[in-house]
């Protein structure tokens, strides 16, 4: 039986996936649509698109992403943290 996750947990999972994807692609910049195709199993599904949009918004507000129009890239803080984790 699949475990039903609370909305906050679901949001955190999507945020982590978005950040991991953008860190993996760095230094290349991604558009929102490119990111959506990589993260969502069905990019045309409204709920999946909305979840990725919320993740990008929340990560941007927290200072981990930068967004300029359609382009999205990790912030210097996110890149540095990623370097520290890599050892």
Image: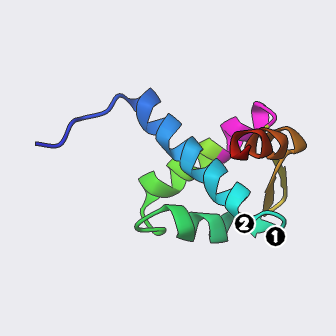
Identify the residue at the far front of this view: 87
Which quadrant of the figure has residue 36?
bottom right
Marks 1 and 2 sit apart, C-alpha to C-alpha, by 6 Å
Name the chief secondary structure element in magenta: helix
Residue drawn at point x = 46 percent, y = 28 percent = 8
Quadrant including the C terminus: top right
Q: Which of 18 and 7 is in front in this view?
A: 18
Considering the numbered disc 1 on the image, is that residue within a helix, a strand or a loop? loop
Q: Mark 2 points at which residue?
A: 25
The image quadrant that residue 59 belongs to is: top right
Quarter of the image with the N terminus is top left
Residue at image x 70%, y 58%?
Answer: 22
Residue 13 percent location from the top left of the image: 48, 41
Residues marked 1 and 2 touching at CB (< 8 Å): yes
- The vertical placement of 26 against 17, above or below, is below
**Residue stretch in magenta:** 56-63
Quick check: 53 above or below 6?
Answer: below
Q: Mark 1 points at which residue?
A: 28
- Callout 1: 10 Å neighbours few (<14), some, many (20+)? few
Residue occupying image coordinates x 74% and y 67% = 31
The local secondary structure at tag 2 comes to helix
In the displayed image of the protein, which residue is found farthest to the left? 1
Q: Which of 19 and 55 is in front in this view?
A: 19
């Amino acid at each position: 039986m699949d475990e039903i996750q609370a909305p906050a947990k679901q949001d955190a999972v999507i945020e982590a996936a978005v950040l991991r994807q953008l860190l993996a692609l760095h230094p290349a910049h991604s558009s929102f649509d490119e990111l959506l195709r990589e993260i969502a199993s069905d990019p045309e599904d409204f709920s999946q698109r909305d979840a990725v949009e919320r993740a990008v918004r929340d990560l941007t507000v927290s200072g981990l992403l930068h967004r300029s129009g359609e382009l999205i890239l990790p912030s210097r803080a996110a890149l540095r943290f990623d370097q520290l984790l890599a050892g």
